[in-house]
Image (spheres, rainbow, N blue to C red):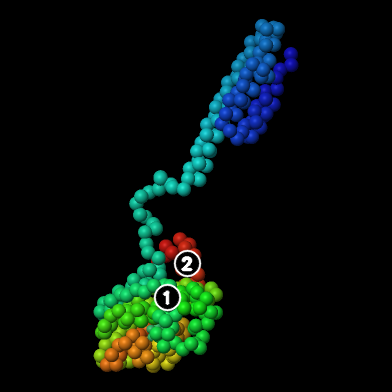
Amino acid sequence: MPELNFDKVYASLDLRIKDIVNIDEFDELTKEFLGKNSLISEERKKLSSLSKEDKKNYGMKLTEATEFITSRIKEQRQLYLDSQFNNKEEAEVTDISIDWKPTRGTYKHVLSTVMEEVVSIFSSIGYEVAYGPEAETSWHNFDALNTPDWHPARYESDTLYLDEKLQTLLRTQTSTVQIRHMEENEPPVYIVAPGRVFRSDQLDATHSPVFHQLEGLAIDKNLTFTDLKGTLEFFVKEFFGNNVETKFIPHFFPFTEPSAEVLVKWQNGEWLEILGCGMVDPNVLSNVNYPESYKGFAWGVGIERLAMLRYKIDHIKNFYDNDIRFLEQF
Ligand code: DAH
């Protein structure tokens, strides 16, 4: 008597299961493989015409097959449900199972940490914090800072202007806060101004179109270049350690006279520039109507540069990429 090829039936069941895309299809499969018109049912109908012995044997095989198919469908249905659940959970934006205990992720960005440290070094010697806007007038960014009309820093290739007449811009330096503070406050002045500045620069290893500076300004009756040197040497030692060597070299800035750059000697013996500084030009003081009896000094330091030197970071882009593997190291 020809028997049903059970292996073939199971194989075709498995093939159909693989193609399932909807949970309801499992019910359809049960109907198809075990329902009234299924192969198994057709075979059962034939049992009555068999001998007693064959009826018993084949009947048992058909029952086993029914059980096998039933449990196969049940098991695969559950696996399908589980996988649907996992997919949904993975796609979920909020993972409510996350551990609320802050084992990682609760630290400040390295630029904030460095900025705060620099601010606190200067506040420890009496400087107050002042702020100014990032969108500025050309007056505050250039004119009041004694920058002549022809100065290259004013070129559109260097500065991001906000209007066609070049009257407003994104500040290129925190020196603007010197002017804003002096316009509104009488001397003496001892302030630091942390903030973001913008330049029309291409991104390369050490330049970014957006970066951070800390400006410093001291105005009083008897300030000299010696006070400037002492203040900035104190800062460099606090920040980089007592053993670091510094040197001042002559430079030019429109708003200071004389002007200088401060360099620190790095591990490999190289001298690296970290800030610009100088004695505030008398034209700047008269632009804000300060009495002639006052003078002082100013400086501007790049925060990214400080962080790159201290932590040996080789590309400025690392600060802004928000790659957690970089950020969590600090
Ligand atoms: N503003 C200058 C810059 O962005 C840095 C600077 C130099 C600031 C000398 C100062 C200063 O206050 O006195 O390059």
Is residue 289 something that shows in the picture?
Answer: yes
Sooner in the amino-acid sequence: mark 1 or mark 2: 1
Is residue 244 something that shows in the picture?
Answer: no
- Tell me what residue is drawn at x 69 percent, y 26 percent: 8
Which residue bears the numbered disc 2?
320
Q: Is the CB of the residue bearing disc 1 within 8 angstroms of ligand 1?
A: no
**Residue 204: which quarter of the image?**
bottom right
The amino acid type found where label 2 is placed reads Tyr
Callout 1–callout 2 Cβ contact below 8 Å: no
The label shown at residue 136 is 1
The C terminus appears in which quarter of the rendering?
bottom left
- Tell me what residue is drawn at x 53 percent, y 38 percent: 83
Q: Secondary structure at mark 2?
A: loop
Ligand 1 occupies quarter: bottom left
Q: Position of residue 326 (x, y in %)?
A: 46, 64
Q: Position of residue 136 (x, y in %)?
A: 42, 75
Q: Is residue 108 above or below residue 293?
A: above
Q: Position of residue 194 (x, y in %)?
A: 36, 74
Query: Is residue 162 rendered to the left or right of residue 48?
Result: left
The amino acid type found where label 1 is placed reads Glu
- Tell me what residue is drawn at x 46 percent, y 48 percent: 93
The CA span between labels 1 and 2 is 24 Å
Q: Secondary structure at mark 1?
A: strand
- Tell me what residue is drawn at x 56 percent, y 31 percent: 23
In the displayed image of the protein, which residue is found farthest to the front?
165
